[in-house]
Image: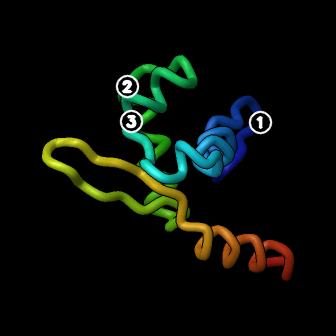
Amino acid sequence: MLRTPTDETRLHILTWLREPGTAAGGVTADAVAERFALPGPVAATHLRLLEATGMLRSSRSGDRVCYHRDDIRIAEVARMFEKGW
């Protein structure tokens, strides 16, 4: 889910969201598209997939949706894989 043979974009998004300035405010699909030179719909799909797995959570402010890391869920998923899930 996080890494495909040809693309690690979702891992890069999660890493970027760990940076102090980005972590505080979260990011929009437009910001991800700009940062990683992706079409807007592709960036939005990456974010929705990460949210669907619980690794990101979203908040809405007007018509903007901001995504933030869910470090607790990320740690839970990492533990599952460590146990051979």
Callout 3 secondary element: helix
Which residue is located at x 85 percent, y 82 percent?
A: 83
Residue in view at x 53 percent, y 17 percent: 37
Assign the C terminus to one quadrant of the image.
Answer: bottom right
Q: Which residue is mark 1?
A: 5
Name the residue at 28% across, 47% down: 65
Amino acid at dot 2: Gly
Report, in whole angstroms, how far the alpha carbon at label 1 lies from the one at label 2.
22 Å
- Neighbor class of circle 1 (other Cα within 10 Å; few <14, some 14-19, many 20+) is few
Q: Amino acid at mark 3?
A: Ala
Left or right? Give the position of 40 relative to 62: right
Mark with earlier residue (2, 3): 3
| Badge 2 vs badge 3, beta-carbon distance below 8 Å | yes
Give residue 70's quadrant in the image.
bottom right
Mark closer to the observer (3, 1): 3
Mark 2: secondary structure = helix
Residue depicted at x 41% and y 51%: 67
Q: Is residue 5 left or right of residue 25?
A: right
Q: In the current view of this chain or complex, which residue is farthest to the bottom?
A: 83
**Sequence order check, earlier mark of 3 and 1:** 1
**Tag 1 secondary structure:** loop
Q: How far apart are the two marked residues, 2 and 3, measured between alpha carbons?
A: 6 Å
- Where does label 3 land, which residue? 29
Q: x and y percent of residue 23 in the render?
A: 54, 51
Image: 52 above or below 83: above
Closer mark to the observer between disc 1 and disc 2 = 2
Q: Residue furthest left?
A: 62
Q: CA distance from mark 3 to mark 1?
A: 23 Å
Q: Which residue matches tag 2?
A: 40
Badge 3, how many Cα within 10 Å: few under 14, some, many 20+? Answer: many
